[in-house]
Amino acid sequence: MLVTGVGKANASGAVARVLDPARHSGVLCVGICGSLPGGPGIGAVVLATRSVFADEGIQTPEGYQDCREMGFALSPGVCDAFAPTAGWRTILAPLSDAEGVIATVSTCSGTDELAARVVSRTGAVAEAMEGAAVGLAAARIDPRLPFAELRVVSNTTGDRAGQRWELAGALATLGRVLGRHHD
């Protein structure tokens, strides 16, 4: 287990520093997430069908363009969305309450408008700040390594004043899912 800290830079940097394909057979990114409009409720365990970058790009008056649309690849030869292998999905699906795209963001959706844009751009059911970046770091080290993302919903997204949070409960659920009971 590697505790990476919050955000893309912390998580991808930590994984890049430690991941050794000779010692590790894959990467499982776990943590908490925010439920996007129409997404699962607080406390739900979510298995990412894909971990995608939601805000790597440019916002123009004509609309949003991701890096690929701008003519830049995030990493030559490596994709920008990461899905669990069939084997990992078989293992992790029984632990989850929902499956869907998890968007990796630098700026969390603290407005209804931003939450709706993340859903529109990515089709995501939840957002977090690390998954796709961890997947990218792992793929750059060894694209054959399996990767998956599993999250527990700790909060709603949208206008900050209307958000609901249950961080302690989400962390307790995550501990139980990982087999780490704390009484």
Image (cartoon, rainbow, N blue to C red):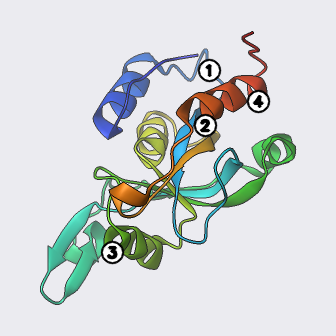
Q: Name the residue under label 1.
A: 24
x and y, in percent, of residue 158 in the image: 40, 63
Question: Residue at 36% across / 53% down in the picture?
Answer: 105
x and y, in percent, of residue 35 in the image: 55, 57
Give how far apart the Cα atoms at labels 3 and 2 are.
36 Å
Q: Which amino acid does label 2 sit on?
A: Leu
Q: Nearer the viewer, residue 30 or 37?
A: 37
> Which one is in front in this view, the residue at disc 4 or the one at disc 1?
4
Q: Earlier in the sequence, mark 3 or mark 1?
A: 1
Q: Which of marks 4 and 3 is nearer the N terminus?
A: 3
Q: Which mark is residue 177?
A: 4
Q: Given contact means CB atoms under 8 Å apart, are the residues at marks 4 and 3 in contact? A: no
Quadrant of the rendered image containing residue 180? top right
Q: Name the residue under label 3.
A: 113
Quadrant of the rendered image containing residue 68? bottom left
> Which one is in front in this view, the residue at disc 3 or the one at disc 1?
3
> Which one is in front in this view, the residue at disc 3 or the one at disc 2?
3
Give how far apart the Cα atoms at labels 4 and 1 are.
21 Å
Give how far apart the Cα atoms at labels 3 and 1 are.
40 Å
Question: Residue at 29% across / 49% down in the picture?
Answer: 106
Question: Residue at 51% across / 19% down in the picture?
Answer: 20
Q: What residue type is labelled 3?
A: Glu
